[in-house]
Amino acid sequence: MFRLFRYLRGYVRESIIAPLFKMLEASFELFVPLVMANIIDVGIKNGDTAYIWRQCAVLIFLGVFGFGCSITAQYFAAKASMGLGTGLRRDLFHHIHGFSYTELDQIGTPTLVTRLSSDVNQVQTGVNLLLRLFMRSPFIVVGAVVMAFAISPGMTVIFLAAVLLMALAIFLIVKITVPIYKKAQNTLDRVMLLTRENYVGARVVRAFSRQEDEKKEFAGANDLLKGIQQKAGRISALMNPVTYVLVNLAIIAILLQGGVQVDTGMLTQGEVIALVNYMNQILVALIALANLIITASKAWASAARVNEVFDTPSTMKEGERQVKEKEEAPAVSFSHVNFTYARAGAPSLTDISFKAEKGETIGVIGGTGSGKTTLVSLIPRFYDTTGGEVCVSGVNVKEYPFRQLRRKIGMVPQKAVLFAGSIRDNMKWSREDVSDQEIWEALEIAQAREFVEKKDGLDEQIAPGGRNLSGGQRQRLTIARALAGKPEILILDDSASALDFATDAALRRAIREKTRGCTVFLVSQRVSTVQQADKILVLDDGALAGVGTHRELFRNCEVYREICLSQLSKEEVAAL
Amino acid sequence: MKRQKEAAQKETLKRILGLIRPYWWMAALILLFAVITVAATLYGPILIGQGVDLIIGQGNVDFAGLRSLILQFLLMIAVTGISQWLMSLMTNRITYQVVRDMRVQAFNRMEELPLKYMDNHQPGDALSRIITDVEQFSDGLLMGFTQLFTGVLTIVGTLCFMLTLDLATTVLVVCLTPLSFFVAGFIAKRTYTMFKLQSETRSEMTSLVEEMVGNEKIVQAFSYEERAEERFAGINERLRVCGIRALFFSSLTNPATRFINGLVYAGVGVLGALKAITGTISVGDLSAFLTYANQYTKPFNEISGVVTELQNALACAQRLFAFIDEPPVTPDDDDAVVLEKGKGRVEFDQVGFSYDPKVPLIENLNLKVEPGQRIAIVGPTGCGKTTLINLLMRFYDVNTGTLKIDGTPIGHITRNSLRANFGMVLQETWLKAGTIHENIAYGRPDASREEVVEAAKRVHAHSFISRLPQGYDTVIAEDGGNISQGQKQLLCIARVMLMHPPILILDEATSSIDTRTEMKVQRAFEELMRGRTSFIVAHRLSTVRNADRILVMKDGKIIESGRHEELLEQNGFYKQLYESQFAATV
């Protein structure tokens, strides 16, 4: 948490002024009971009306100044904490962009999103409260005790004991309930899970006629939740009565002790009233402090989560200057590439070597987990090899600046993700200056022209997550998005899975015909998809089981033949 | 318009009262304890004041009086403490109980909703109603109500107690306090628009972050980082500016009310002191007045906060009730028959169906399927293949014509017994978060371990299950992260295998299963289909070739039907489809 205070650096003035003025306000507030005591002891006793009016002016003066201080403090606190939040968000967002896929895999993007949004907000709120209240409440508590001491040293014991007991009670109640609330949260997660599960799986639940059982299970989970919540409620319900009782017992003690001291003339009646008021001020301040501690501990946890992100350095350094590509070299070449995912025991790729010449179509086939996606991820340097080297246009990918390398490559990932905005906005992802005509050409190749025309054309708005499009339409648009940048290398990572076979075939034909000169990587599990490639890489458990054309491989490669036999008809196999 | 809204709110309130009715005695006790708490709390300052009046000065302290007063005070503290505690205890109880009731009601309705509703609404919608709305409702309405009630009581009570002390001072307090009310209201109104702006900007930022960071890999693949940061910086700056204003203005409420309070305090102090000089009131009365002056504004501020919360809670309740009021599926006819496990003869007679009356889909579908036949359904995406499943399982009702199973129209069969005749394996593998055993036994929760293992063995799932650390007791995580897609599919098949249904509905996976598992799944399907009528949405050639009949669908109509060879000979749409799949070899 304290580390994040460096974001207050630009707000040093604000972060000092805010708590300072808060303390000033608090000290004004501490004077009020004293003034009132004077009114009673001097004004009323002597019947001095003028004195009373003067003291009243003092009270109003205290109020006005307190208010002024408070406004100043609130403003500076708001400014400082929002400034901290803004800077923190900016840097965190930037830092995340520096992560390579390795870090992204390790941390996971959903948690990055929560850290960037709700955690930063928590920190921001926490800092704001801290600036405003963290000084104020303890100051009032201590100040009130000191004032009590000044009025009557004999009363200090009562005050100290009351503060101690109340703080202890509040602390215990918070300490006991927090874990119970946490447990309640977990149970609530289960209630949520059951709800989602039953909604998404409605067909299966009904197919097996399990509705009644599901209802019972849900009611059971809710009863459990109710039980936990009520338990937590029983304890936190003690908070108000306990503090109430404690503070009033203390007041009784003040009255008793006060009676004795007034009787001996050590204390005045007005001072007794002032002491009672101080006790009440302490209670209010302690409760505020308890709430503050709860918020602060949340902010603390959030800050730790944010710091975790900052503490994760990027494992990848990009090349510093533009590299000169070699005209004659193959588009992509792997030589003795090994790759092991961070923290994984076994390598995902072992000793991969191949060359893809310019304009060639390379098929990549193999079962799930055989390393197909990993292999193509190394081309745009999403990961660094753990051995051997990957070259694009004859230059090691590690020497490229990211931008230069990735501009050359059009990537179509497995998961078809589009972004909120128009289709045109989405098509401009690779380059900002893509013309409408280029977009239409790309859509044509991707077999998307027809449905885009049927909609609002390029201005058609895409709902977040592309919900207004079918899976197949999304996939075709992601293909078009990659094509629109006119890449030298196009990578299709199993990206036609939602297309029916007719569209899939048409797509492959169009890519073959209309992107001459472009090196295409086709990753698939379907033989029919890669069959026509100039070269097929057969992956088996991370190793290259064979490289060659469909015919060659069918004859020489055991793994490839096995895949073919499982997918093709006897006639087709026989035709080979 | 406004009247309508009011009427709707009234209706909602009535239903909320209906929810509380079973716990009316608790609600009544809460009100009672609230009255006691407020009265006792308010009596406190008077007792303290009386105590102060017994301590007048040197040698002028009435110890005997003080002692008896303190006994009274102790009693009062005990009463307040206990009734305050009981009050929050009961409020908690009733709140969580009502929350539970509402959730269970909503969930039960969800289980009865027609599939049509679920297909057209995001699960997030139902989730936010059942979880978030209920929570906000309980926080706002139930807690808010007690706050409102005690708040009003405190105001009225304070007024009464003050009147017993002194009229003029009371009038002063009453005249000054609304000031604080107005100031709080003014601030609340100003902050509302600022908060709205802030939360809009914030959600704008969250969606950008979700998109960009959520898809960070794509952002990097397209070197979009800088453009993303530019967009982010723009929103971030706007958020900073409106955030400062929202934060600043909202944090003014406390100081402003404290300030007004201070003024009231000073006013009461002066007036009280002047009166004390003339002897109209005692110093103790003055101290009681001062305490009241401090407390009096608090309920006002709370009430102004509670009112918005109550409105919000009402809106949440309305949303929830709207969900509960969704019409459920029409119940089974009274004379609906229970269909025993039959032979598996299926007959479509002049069936017509469409999701949207404006867009006709299936028209005049006639089809007879004999027991044990294997029907493959093929066609381009969106041609209505899954619609057939929806109709067979009666997830949707046919619009015209009849669909018969073993000669009985399915409209006259109880849904449960109808569905017991079907075994369904869908492409989207749905498993419950639970153990493997529970999942396989999903259709027959009473199945023994032996039966479950037997079913798993028959679909070739036993070997991978036994390799898992806890075997059949391995818990499948919500996203099924610990087992592969293909393995999930095997579990879904085993789940059906345990049921021995006469008719099968299978939706073949298009991809994403590795070859070896796929072969296992294929073998499992074969095993499952033996001797059963089966409908298969086919993506694989071998399936089509082994089918007794292929239905070629296009735009919701069956345009060709027959065996593989026959269809190829027809040289129609099927041939086109078939060839395009292997276009590369042509």
Image: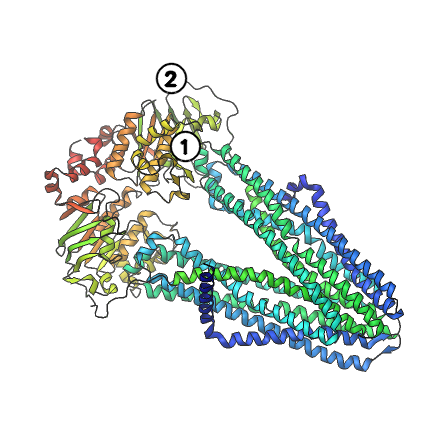
- Looking at marks 1 and 2 on the same chain, the residue that comes earlier in the sequence is marked by 2
Residue on which the image places disc 1: A338
Q: Which of B475 and B156 is in front in this view?
A: B156
- Please say whether residue A35 is visible from this viewpoint: yes
Q: Nearer the viewer, residue A113 or B496?
A: A113
Residue on which the image places disc 2: A328
Chain letter belonging to callout 1: A
Above or below — where is B145 with respect to A88? below
Q: Are marks 1 and 2 in contact (CB under 8 Å)?
A: no
Chain letter belonging to callout 2: A
**Colour scheme of the picture:** rainbow
How far from the left and from the top, in percent, is residue A257?
81, 73
How far from the left and from the top, in percent, is residue A263?
87, 75
How far from the left and from the top, in percent, is residue A190?
44, 59
Q: How far apart are the two marked residues, 1 and 2, measured between alpha carbons?
A: 25 Å
Q: Which of the 4 image quarters holds residue B382?
A: top left
